[in-house]
Image (cartoon, rainbow, N blue to C red):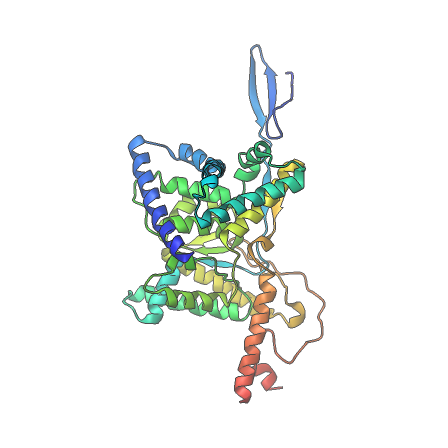
Amino acid sequence: MATLRTLAGPQVSLRLFYTGMLFVSVEEFGMPKTSIEKPRLPTLWVDTAIGMKLAKVSRGKSISDVEMRRMTRLKELVVGLARSCRLLCPEGDQELEYWDTRLDEGISKEFAALSRGIWMLPHQAAHNSQIFVAMSAHVRGDKEFRLPSEIYFRGDPVSELRKISQQSTLFRFMAFRT
Amino acid sequence: MLDMNNENRKGMYSHSERLRIENNAKGRAYSEQFALEQRAFVNSMVDFSRSFRARLPAGDVKPWEHLAVMGYEAYFAEWYRLTKKFADWEGLCDFFVSDYFYELPATKISSQLYATLVTDNRPIEHGDSMDVKHLSLAIPMAHFVLTDRKMANRIADLGIDEEWNALVFSESSIESLFEKLEEIGRSWSAKRPTNGATTAAATPSLGGQPTPAPPRPRLPHPSRFSADGRYERWRNE
């Protein structure tokens, strides 16, 4: 078996087999491996449809008992964990999705309660960060590249969450003193 | 901008639904549509740039189109920084049709989900296109994702959740999410971090216990407030 490597760009290498007849098979595509990094705290993403249901519960709109029970439990758990800095539940640029709907203010409040003010960067900004990492790997011909969790946030969301929690503790302390 | 977004949202929905009907009539398969979705980024960049350049001398451009141009210019600027090649359309477009771009989570997930939506027999729902956009960032970023049942099924069918190491739940499986969240609460209650150990990682491995972080040296407490947000502790001191 004779092996001949023909480079047709960085992504394709061909292998030539001789077994009585000649044919070419693709040995490997050299596809780059993308590794991702998630935030240090467990992170939950809540879709807009769930935010709408949470708003319905808060506003006392008609919703089935099962849904009401589920939504109440969800909010209780997420708010409790986020308040004690054990869970990140960031909000994305979802207001573009629910803006100008009947419940827009309510949905916004629900997401603010779950996220405690932790926001992800807008979709385009995060996508661009991914593109720039990949572009750099493409130019260098790296076989692997890593997407850090920081590309989704403006700063460190975990530190931000802790800062917010400490501030709210201070507010509670002040309220208690007065 | 929000008004424009509202129009785009409605336009996106009607475009997607029209495309789905056409695809069903043509019998277009998922794999074929997926390949088209992957190339959609570079195709739209090239088409838009040609059209913009043709209309610019007559001033026939909308304000938002300048923003789009600025976005594309950022890619050329970064490409120039890396390669020292100015206005290198060929090089940049080669990147946008390479696996480096196709394997990006935002590109891959949105291509997969959108190709599924527009080749499905079921009609597209109003929020679906926006959900695809959000999920393409959220799935690789988050450990847990809570979405609607149809989208959760699509994600599971395509194996996106496993590929990007995320647990995807819908309302029908929300009890399992509650269990996971309660597990996080329990594991952290046992080892409550102090201010000195604020960056302890508790990233749960899928289906397993959260991985405890290596202990950090304990620093002096900066204030009398406990990091867990409770004031009862110092009140009793």
Q: Would residue B189 appear left or right of A47 to someone viewing this image?
A: right
Image location (x, y in percent) of residue A37: 59, 51
> Measured along the vertical axis of the image, is residue B93 above or below residue A1?
below
Residue A119 makes an appearance in the image? yes
- The residue drawn where x is 61% and y is 45% is A133
> Measured along the vertical axis of the image, is residue A28 above or below residue A18?
below
The residue positioned farthest toward the bottom in the image shown: A178
The residue closer to the viewer here, A136 or A18, is A136
Q: How many marks?
A: 0
- The residue drawn where x is 37% and y is 33% is B29
Task: Give the quadrant of residue B225.
Answer: bottom right
Residue B163 makes an appearance in the image? no
The residue closer to the viewer here, B60 or B130, is B60
Image location (x, y in percent) of residue A52: 36, 62
Image location (x, y in percent) of residue B15: 34, 43
Q: Would residue B35 appear left or right of B141 to someone viewing this image?
A: left
Q: Would residue B38 appear left or right of B24 to someone viewing this image?
A: right
Q: Quadrant of the N terminus of chain B?
A: bottom left
The residue closer to the viewer here, B4 or B17, is B4
Image location (x, y in percent) of residue A69: 35, 67
The residue closer to the viewer here, A45 or A23, is A45
Q: In which quarter of the image is the C terminus of chain B?
A: bottom right
> Measured along the vertical axis of the image, is residue A14 above or below residue B77?
above
